[in-house]
Image (cartoon, rainbow, N blue to C red):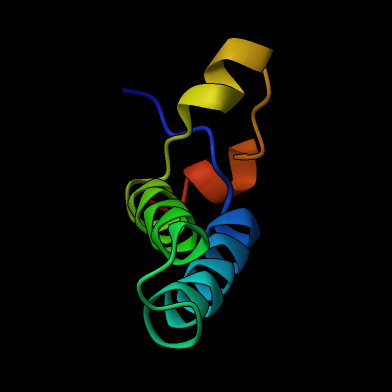
């Protein structure tokens, strides 16, 4: 599994995931919208932590440039 999510992309995914998680678990608790937001939060967190996005692979997108990948 090749990393295709860059450092800044990972950072923003984790920030956005925490916002969605908060909304899904505390604001829209017990609703279908809350479940959807919490699920999206989990998927974004996994993608941000591991640096791999399946959708990016399908679309041929790679935000992990050579300079960033040499740091890891």
Location of residue 66 (image quadrant): top right
Q: Is residue 40 left or right of residue 58?
A: left
49 left or right of 31 in image: left
Residue at horizontal 33 percent and vertical 50 percent from the top: 46
Q: Quadrant of residue 52?
A: top left
The N terminus lies in quadrant: top left
In the rendering, at what x and y percent does residue 55 appear? 55, 24
Tell me what residue is drawn at x 35 percent, y 72 percent: 30
Where residue 12 sits in the image (x, y, percent)? 62, 66
Between 51 and 39, the residue placed more toward the observer is: 39
Horizontal and vertical percent position of residue 72: 37, 51
- Number of numbered discs on residues: 0
Residue at x 63% of width, y 55% of height: 9
Q: Nearer the viewer, residue 52 or 45?
A: 45
From the viewer's perspective, tell me whether residue 67 is left or right of residue 54. right
Question: In this view of the protein, which residue sits in the foreground, 66 or 1?
Answer: 1
Residue under the point 39% across and 25% down: 2
């Amino acid at each position: 599994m090749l990393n295709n999510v860059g450092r800044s992309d990972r950072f923003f995914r984790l920030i956005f995931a925490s916002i969605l998680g908060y909304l899904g678990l505390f604001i829209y608790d017990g609703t279908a919208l809350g479940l959807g937001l919490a699920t999206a939060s989990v998927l974004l967190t996994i993608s941000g932590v591991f640096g791999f996005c399946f959708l990016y692979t399908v679309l041929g997108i790679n935000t992990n440039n050579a300079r960033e990948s040499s740091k890891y």
